[in-house]
Amino acid sequence: METITVVGAGMMGPGIAQVFAARGHSVRVQDLAEDRLATVDGRVRANLGKMADYGLVDRDSIPAILGRIDVTSELAAACRGADLVIEAVTENLALKQEVFAELDRICSRDAILCSNTSVISITRIGERAVYRDRIVGTHFYQPPFLVPLVEVVRTEFTAPACMDLVCNLLRDAGKVPVRVQKDVPGFIANRMQHALWREAFALIDEGICDAETVDIAVRNSFGMRLPVLGPVANADMVGLDLTLAIHDYVLPHLNASPLPSATLRAAVARNELGFKSGSGFLKWTDESIAAAREQLATHLLEALSRAKNRIHTEGEK
């Protein structure tokens, strides 16, 4: 696939474009907002600069990577001749349906159409399209140029060849694609992530501990193991007999409400939105927000750098 189009220059679009441009693809980024398009070059340049600091990108290659990314406000122009289109607009079902109906109309019949939605049904997003066999979910995690995982979601209409092509493309771009064989809300990773968040918020709702304690507990216990030991391998390690005994006892006591946390809902009603407003479950200043973002970026960059060095060392043996 030579030409890739990314629809949306918001939180995710530029980072997704960067992934493919860094692997030699021509990429077009489309957005109706000219002010967002104007930030694409600077944002990608900053991302690449940080990666170069950790040996993840050759600094001399940055101008060429940036040169492969074009921006436009015209959807038809962005999609002309595109082999693959990735929608990365706001998480709004009606908007995504409108975008996909238009993409289905203007794109080449051979073009594969993907959605970067994190939770919305791919089937619902593409239900107004005629050629639904070429629609696939490609859920990148934030930030997409650093987090390896991409969930590739099939619907009952998706052609197997499209799944294979997308997975191969992502693998060639250095990502870790996983196949989601059923189009369920939240896919794989977000279902697990939000199940954890539901229990975390329930602990706060019930007065068992405060918000800060929840994060301290996670960061200093099982959170430390997760990069090398997933939940399934962990269960095998401790023994499935013990796991079953624990579940028999504790699962009836865990939160299973189909409704969001009361504390969460009350915070949103007070416009306490977290980073956006300076307070949420926790209090935030401009300095602490910047520090949290920097800490996350550094953690991811260091993890990728270690992985690259490990692969290089193993290759020399």
Image (cartoon, rainbow, N blue to C red):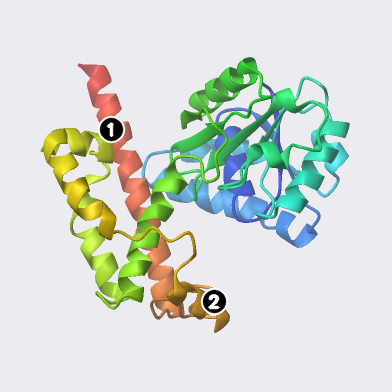
In the picture provided, is 12 more to the left or to the right than 257?
A: right
Residue at 66% over, 47% down: 88
Q: Secondary structure at mark 1?
A: helix
In this view of the protein, which residue sits in the foreground, 166 or 241? Answer: 241
Determine which quarter of the picture holds residue 194: bottom left
* Viewer-proximal residue among 243 and 93: 243
Quarter occupied by the C terminus? top left
Q: Nearer the viewer, residue 27 or 170?
A: 170
Query: Which is closer to the viewer, label 2 or label 1?
Result: 2
How many marks can you see? 2
The three-letter code of the residue at mark 1 reads Asn
What crowding class fits label 2: few (fewer than 14 Cα within 10 Å), some (14-19), or many (20 or more)? few
Q: Position of residue 95 (x, y in %)?
A: 76, 52
The answer to whether residue 69 is seen in the rendering is: no
x and y, in percent, of residue 286 in the image: 46, 78
The spot of residue 240 in percent (x, y) is 16, 34
* Mark 2 or mark 1, earlier in chain: 2
Identified at 59% across, 24% down, the residue is 166
Q: Are the residues tagged 2 and 1 within 8 Å (C-beta)?
A: no
Residue for badge 2: 268
Q: Amino acid at mark 2?
A: Val
Compute the Cα span from label 2 to label 1.
43 Å
Residue 309, which numbered label? 1
Please give the name of the residue rendered at 57% of the width and 50% of the height, measured from the top-left corner: 45
Instruction: Look at the image and tell me in which quarter the N terminus lies.
Output: top right
Q: Is residue 206 visible?
A: yes
| Residue at image point 57% right, 46% down | 15
